[in-house]
Image (cartoon, helix red, strand yellow):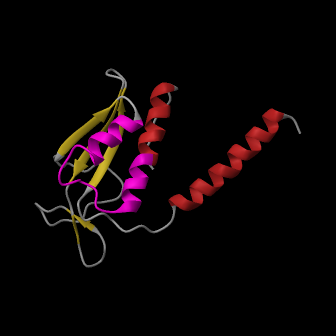
Amino acid sequence: MNLTAETNLLTQQLQVIDDQLSKRSIALDPSGYFIIYVDREQNLICAKHYSNIINDKGLAVDPETGKTIPAKGKVDRRAEQLFTGRTAKELCVEIFEKIEPCPVTMFDHAAYLGREAHRAELALLQQQDYIQD
């Protein structure tokens, strides 16, 4: 097998692992959630932070309306804060090191945000679309 074929096979195998892990159940961070996107005009990775309350069923609820926040689809809410960075590292420093109290209270949420910031950075650099996992 040549190097290109081996690389393609490995890429496919890694994608299968990521796809399977994306289907796992996760606990939601009671301090809120982030919507991450790329601003190509300003060459920035952006993360809007939204507050939420976790109800007794483990679902995120809008603190203002008391309504469950859907996992998919457009939600008309005002972000609590906007974080930006030119790199994944810069964005993570803004979120985790410059704000008191930190808007993330769970380690798995922090790891997820780091991964997503890195994916957004790659999409920005490679001029590709970025869709948050």
The answer to whether residue 103 is left or right of residue 4 is: left
Give coordinates of residue 72: x percent, y percent: 36, 55
Query: Going by the picture, which residue comes out furthest to the right?
Result: 1
The answer to whether residue 24 is left or right of residue 108 is: right
The answer to whether residue 20 is left or right of residue 65 is: right
Query: Going by the picture, which residue comes out furthest to the front?
Result: 97
Give coordinates of residue 29: x percent, y percent: 30, 63
Q: Judge whether 25 appears above or below 34 on screen.
A: below
Foreground of the two, 24 or 7:
7
Residue at 26% in and 60% down: 69
Query: Going by the picture, which residue comes out furthest to the bottom?
Result: 56
Query: Going by the picture, which residue comes out furthest to the left?
Result: 64
How many labels sit on residues?
0
The answer to whether residue 37 is seen in the rendering is yes
The answer to whether residue 132 is seen in the rendering is no
Residue at 32% in and 32% down: 85
Give coordinates of residue 110: x percent, y percent: 37, 54
Give coordinates of residue 32: x percent, y percent: 25, 58
> Mostly what secondary structure, the magenta segment?
helix
Residue at 70% in and 51% down: 13
The answer to whether residue 12 is left or right of residue 92 is: right
Residue at 43% in and 45% down: 116
Foreground of the two, 58 or 116:
116
What span is in magenta? 88-114
Quarter of the image with the N terminus in it = top right
Q: Confirm whether the magenta stretch covers residue 39.
A: no
Q: Confirm whether the magenta stretch covers residue 101.
A: yes
